[in-house]
Amino acid sequence: MQKQDGKDPALAVLDTLVVDRQAVSPENPVPKAADEGLHILLVEDSEPSVELIRQTLLDSGLKFSMATVDSREGFEAELSRQAPGIILSDYWLPTFDGGMALEITKQVAPDVPFIFVTGGLGEEVVIEMLKQGATDYVLKSRLSRLVPAVNRALRETEQRRERQEAEEKLRRSHGQLRALSSRLQLVREEERTRIAREVHDELGQALTGLKLDLSWLYGRLAGNSVMHRMVKAMSSQVDATILTVRRIATELRPGVLDSLGLAAAIEWQTTDFQSRTCILCETTIDVKEAVWDRELSTACFRAFQETLTNIIRHAKATRVEVRLTQVDHELILTVRDNGRGISEKEAADARSIGLIGMRERLAQVGGGVQFAGAPNQGTTVTIRVPMPEAVADGPGRA
Ligand SMILES: Nc1ncnc2c1ncn2[C@@H]1O[C@H](COP(=O)(O)OP(=O)(O)OP(=O)(O)O)[C@@H](O)[C@H]1O
Ligand SMILES: [Mg+2]
């Protein structure tokens, strides 16, 4: 295709101009970048075209500086000298073409809007250039479109930048929240372990001492039946308190989780659940190893406890099946009840803090959880966590 403009090889490579004019009309506001002084990089070899484009921009009241280039070297040098706010480019040049300028721009400065300002281009070339990422296309014979096209491109770029910034901020704060939540879980778990140990050891020992003293006292009160009865009642009370202390310590952090591992803790918790609720439980444990990484076991166990609590509170179930299996390098814990069935809405509700907590906790160890339910057909909770490789490949448990 022939270029329609006259060519002037002697055209100055760089042509900088700063103009300050009145603001444009409210219907056609100049974007923020323009208010601060827009730098335009113009790829054009025809001096009359340069003048025409410059005049059109000046007439609109746009405040800008402009550099003009007509070769690849000039274009690259100008791009690295000063980042443009927008690139306006002819398509046909003696030693360079707009397609190449667009390609370089997409590699070096992909966020800079790029508008073709040409004498005429075939439809196919236009479509191809737009596909390659050109922002717009303005015919030199219809330069009245240039300013609206520039303004729109700048506005869109600004909006894109703001959106990217907002997304980045959101990503950062989400990451911080995750880290905070992870830290809180860890601190909470450490705290619970410490309190469980203290309650168990300190209170347990003090109560055992008290019981020994009462037993000694009982022997000294021979013949005094009233006092005997009283000491006996006190001793029974101490026994009951010892049991309560043990229960509290276990609820805070079951020792079996640390000593025998996740599988044993799940078995113990299920038995305890059955005896407290009279809901029939069937447990299948089919895994190789008993003890796993503490963080992983804790996340899985706490999710399991929340699942059981939810069954008591919401399911109206009479039967629960618990299955712990290992598939390749993944640990799968399935808890199925025969209750009313969780709805999709409940499972996805942003206010379901218990379920969100489970998701977050498991995500922290690289796992996940799914909730599936059907009306009166029960709920199935599937917890998955990746296993440390050494454990996954380890010897069989049984
Ligand atoms: N096994 C289940 N069967 C039926 N519905 C369930 C079951 N588990 C959870 N749900 C539903 O999902 C909702 C969300 O559960 P989630 O654990 O997040 O909250 P919660 O148990 O109501 O309160 P908490 O924040 O104290 O855990 C419940 O309110 C309940 O309606
Ligand atoms: Mg709950």
Image (cartoon, helix red, strand yellow):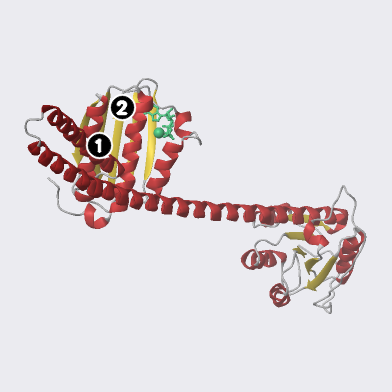
Q: Indicate the position of residue 71 as horizontal and vertical percent values.
A: 73, 75
Instruction: Identify which residue is drawn at 87% across, 47% down.
Output: 27
Give above or below for 158 relative to 236: below
Q: Indicate the position of residue 358 as horizontal and vertical percent values.
A: 39, 41
**Residue 165 seen in this snapshot:** yes
Q: Which residue is mark 2?
A: 337
Disc 2 marks a residue whose amino acid type is: Asp
| Distance from mark 2 CB to nearest ligand 1 atom below 8 Å | yes
The reply, left or right, for residue 69 in relation to residue 100 is right
Q: Which residue is mark 1?
A: 244
- Viewer-closest of 165 and 85: 165
Residue 150: which quarter of the image? bottom right
**Residue 330 seen in this snapshot:** no
Give above or below for 166 relative to 7: above
The reply, left or right, for residue 197 in relation to residue 156 is left
**Quadrant containing the N terminus in the rendered view:** bottom right
Q: CA distance from mark 1 to mark 2?
A: 29 Å
Q: Secondary structure at mark 1?
A: helix
Q: Which mark is residue 261?
A: none
Q: Earlier in the sequence, mark 1 or mark 2?
A: 1
- Viewer-closest of 171 and 118: 171
Q: Secondary structure at mark 2?
A: strand
